[in-house]
């Protein structure tokens, strides 16, 4: 368990997280593996798992009318996946697929929500970190839209 605690504490998403919370996360983490091109979750599915990607890449896809599914962001090692577990209605907002073999840590989202409810300081830390992820991904999407529409003029 000590190795798992060190692994979690060493990830950028959990940087400077209180060691007590790292231990809580280590106690409930499960290994997850996905083959290249394996579907991890579909848009609208309940969010039963939150992931920290350790190795590999995951595509975040959206359905583009007339074109089908298109990847518009890549989640890489060190990134988290599955922020929707903290915000009702607790459903995936996008489809996610492994673009190559992926190793990750996974947490049961009902258990994480329960931990957050019982320990508001932990809940705040997780919400703060997940909000940072949301803002960063929104900024990336904005920059890509500006570049795309700017190049069509």
Image (cartoon, grey):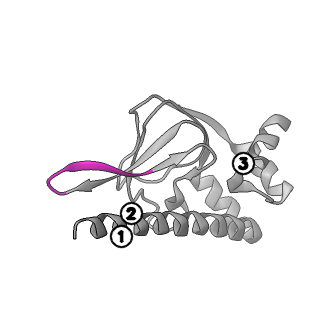
Front position among marks 1 and 3: 1
Q: CA distance from mark 2 to mark 1?
A: 5 Å
Label 2, on which residue?
144
Question: How packed is label 3: few (under 14 Cα within 10 Å), some, or many (20 or more)?
Answer: some
Check residue 66 for magenta coloring: yes
Percent x, y of residue 104 = 60, 38
Residue at the outermost left position: 66
Frontmost residue, 101 versus 5: 101
Check residue 117 for magenta coloring: no
Residue drawn where x is 40% and y is 33% of the image: 38
Q: Which residues are magenta?
A: 65-73
Asked if disc 2 and disc 1 are in contact, CB closer than 8 Å, the reply is: yes
Disc 3 element:
loop
Label 3, on which residue?
11
Frontmost residue, 27 versus 32: 32
Frontmost residue, 74 versus 88: 74
Residue 146 bears which disc, if any? Answer: 1
């Amino acid at each position: 368990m000590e190795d798992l605690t060190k692994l979690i504490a060493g990830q950028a998403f959990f940087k400077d997280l209180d060691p007590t919370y790292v231990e809580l996360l280590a106690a409930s983490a499960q290994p997850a593996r996905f083959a290249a091109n394996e579907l991890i979750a579909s848009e609208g599915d309940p969010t039963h798992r939150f992931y920290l990607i350790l190795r590999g890449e995951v595509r975040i896809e959206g359905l583009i009318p007339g074109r089908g599914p298109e990847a518009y962001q890549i989640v890489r090692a060190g990134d988290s996946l599955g922020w929707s577990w903290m915000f009702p209605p607790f459903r995936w907002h996008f489809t996610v697929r492994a673009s190559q073999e992926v190793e990750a840590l996974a947490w049961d989202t009902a258990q994480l929500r329960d931990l957050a409810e019982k320990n508001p300081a932990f809940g705040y830390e997780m919400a703060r970190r997940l909000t940072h992820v949301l803002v960063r991904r929104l900024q990336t999407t904005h920059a890509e839209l500006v570049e795309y529409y700017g190049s069509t003029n």
